[in-house]
Image (cartoon, grey):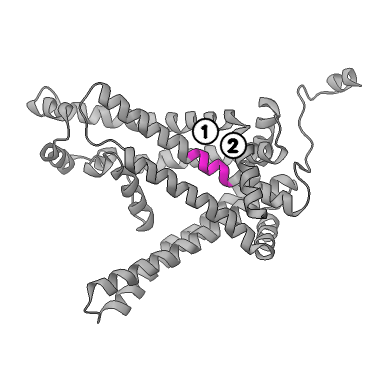
């Protein structure tokens, strides 16, 4: 029951903090606007007043898209048929699994976006751990307190993920896979073997993400300053509560799959300019909101599980910051 209770508790904590979901959605939207503007300029310059412009506005013109791709550079390299509708999700998934390089503009934007999440993570987990309103001052005070701690944690995360994607991924799929399949004559067997390796690799990435999530939770709830200590404590918690931690992670992952599945059913195809374009944009933004909601639910339910196992629901070691935090204000409160 602890898995169900933690998941339900996490769901309630997220729903009681709608401002956090709104804030991270605005952050995501703003992060994508410069890339969208740059791609729009590139497309407009290439189309000009040509007949292809009318065809592109009326729907997908694959011949023109191929012509554009042949001369594109930078962000323009990402404009291809796979960015239409649900294809964009599959394209990102394929790039993630196969460790595909992205244009420098996307890498730079993604890096700034990740940095913003590192800053916000402390305030978000702190809000979920307290499960009560702490105000903008309290939220951003927690963000500032944990930013440099989580920045140090991010360095360890980067080292772990660099090993997984730069070394282990290459060894599994470029060395080990060819070695065990070079004498296989049945294509289906080779496909299932590659699928099994993807599963192994995915489980390792998920395990790393799980440990780092609980490191954040323990750092915030227990006000830990050593991130190596938080990682060790997270490993200990996951080891002692493997079934519950894996269960909460699995429940959240299933919900994520459901969100992706619903979007796959309603995702628009190539439409024309006008109302259908804005409908497609709105559906895409609803999917982004759903995905962000699931991400927040991961943190909230993991925080709830940790606090439930310690019998300290709502407990956070660090006192809530109060504004204005000054001697004069303290004297007036006294």
Report the residue at 70% width, 41% height from top. Answer: 129
In the rendered image, which quarter is residue 58 located in? top left
Residue 194 horizontal/vertical position (percent): 33, 68
Report the residue at 17% width, 35% height from top. Answer: 60
Q: Residues within 10 Å of mark 1 (few under 14, many from 20)?
A: some
Magenta stretch: dominant secondary structure: helix
Q: Secondary structure at mark 1?
A: helix
Q: Relative to 132, does residue 87 appear above or below in the rendering?
A: below
Q: What quarter of the picture does the N terminus occupy?
A: bottom right
Residue at mark 2 to residue at mark 1: CA–CA distance: 9 Å
Q: Relative to 163, does residue 306 appear above or below in the rendering?
A: above
Q: Residues within 10 Å of mark 2 (few under 14, many from 20)?
A: many
> Is residue 157 in view?
no
| Label 2 sits on residue | 120
* Residue 297 within the segment the image draws in magenta: yes
Q: What quarter of the picture does the C terminus occupy?
A: top right
Residue 87 horizontal/vertical position (percent): 28, 44
Left or right, 226 with respect to 177, comes to right
Numbered label attached to residue 24: 1
Instruction: Give the residue furthest to the left.
Output: 51
- Cβ atoms under marks 2 and 1 closer than 8 Å: yes
Magenta span: 292-298
């Amino acid at each position: 029951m602890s898995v169900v209770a933690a998941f339900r508790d996490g769901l309630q904590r997220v729903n009681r903090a709608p401002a956090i979901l709104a804030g991270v959605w605005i952050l995501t939207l703003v992060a994508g606007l410069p890339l969208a503007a740059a791609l729009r300029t590139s497309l407009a310059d290439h189309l000009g007043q040509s007949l292809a412009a009318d065809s592109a506005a009326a729907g997908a013109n694959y011949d023109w898209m191929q012509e554009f791709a042949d001369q594109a550079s930078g962000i323009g390299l990402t404009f291809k048929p796979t960015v239409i509708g649900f294809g964009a999700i599959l394209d990102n998934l394929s790039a993630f699994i196969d460790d595909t390089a992205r244009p420098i503009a996307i890498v730079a934007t993604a890096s700034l976006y990740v940095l913003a999440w590192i800053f916000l993570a402390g305030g978000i987990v702190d809000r979920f751990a307290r499960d009560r309103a702490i105000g903008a001052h309290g939220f951003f005070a927690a963000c500032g307190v944990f930013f440099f701690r989580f920045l140090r944690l991010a360095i360890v995360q980067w080292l772990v993920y660099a090993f997984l994607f730069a070394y282990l991924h290459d060894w599994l799929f470029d060395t080990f896979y060819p070695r065990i399949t070079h004498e296989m004559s049945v294509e289906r067997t080779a496909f299932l073997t590659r699928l099994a390796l993807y599963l192994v690799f995915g489980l390792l990435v998920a395990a790393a993400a799980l440990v780092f999530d609980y490191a954040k939770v323990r750092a915030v709830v227990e006000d830990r300053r050593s991130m190596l200590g938080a990682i060790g404590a997270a490993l200990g918690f996951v080891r002692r509560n493997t079934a519950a931690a894996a269960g909460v992670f699995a429940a959240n992952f299933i919900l994520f799959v459901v969100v992706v599945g619903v979007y796959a059913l309603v995702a628009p195809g190539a439409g024309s300019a006008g109302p259908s374009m804005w409908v497609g944009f709105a559906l895409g933004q609803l999917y982004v909101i759903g995905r962000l909601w699931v991400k927040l639910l991961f943190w909230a339910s993991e925080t709830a599980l940790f606090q439930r196992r310690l019998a300290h629901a709502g407990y956070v070691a660090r006192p809530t910051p109060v504004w204005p935090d000054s001697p004069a204000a303290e004297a007036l409160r006294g």
